Image (tube, rainbow, N blue to C red):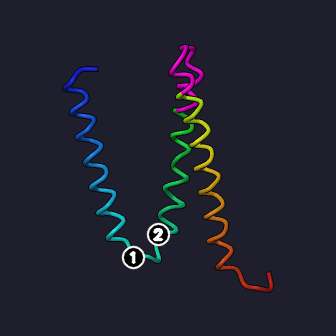
Amino acid sequence: MGAEVAIFLAFILMLSIFLGFELISKVPSTLHTPLMSGANATSGITLVGALLASGSGAEGLSVILGTLAVAFATINVVGGYMVTNRMLAMFKKKGQ
């Protein structure tokens, strides 16, 4: 990886940190849970990419990183589902 690519990736990382901080600070606290559950649900895209990376037929580090990405994306998807389920349970009537 060249220095130009590393600088570009560092710029993208800094920009995403800044935008994430600005987005979270502007969202009211009552909307944090739906925002987080939606963001966790989009980790399904990460899961598909991780499955492709781990099963690409490459050897070594890419398989290990792909396997770790599958594990962490699965945890994030399941956690997002559990948060959404808990949030929706708050809107059910007690008799149901």
- x and y percentages locating residue 22 in the rendered image: 29, 63
Magenta-span inclusion, residue 54: yes
Tell me the residue at 53%/46% (across/down).
Answer: 43
Tell me the quarter of the image containing the C terminus: bottom right
CB of mark 1 within 8 Å of CB of mark 2? yes
Who is closer to the viewer here, 33 or 64? 64
- x and y percentages locating residue 73 in the rendered image: 57, 43
Who is closer to the viewer here, 3 or 58? 3
Give the class, few, some or many, for how many residues have Cα within 10 Å of label 1's Cα (few <14, many ≥20).
few
Quadrant hosting residue 8: top left
Residue 32's label in the rendered image is 2
Residue 28's label in the rendered image is 1
- x and y percentages locating residue 70 in the rendered image: 59, 36
94 sits to left or right of 45: right
SS at badge 1? loop
User: What predominant SS class does the magenta segment belong to?
Assistant: helix
Number of marks in picture: 2
Would you place residue 57 above or below residue 28 in this image?
Answer: above
Tell me the quarter of the image containing the N terminus: top left
Quadrant hosting residue 54: top right
90 sits to left or right of 63: right
Give the class, few, some or many, for how many residues have Cα within 10 Å of label 2's Cα (few <14, many ≥20).
few
Would you place residue 77 above or below residue 64 in this image?
Answer: below
Tell me the residue at 24%/20% (across/down).
Answer: 2
Marks 1 and 2, how far apart at CA: 7 Å
82 sits to left or right of 47: right
Highlighted magenta segment, given as a residue range: 50-64
Quadrant hosting residue 23: bottom left
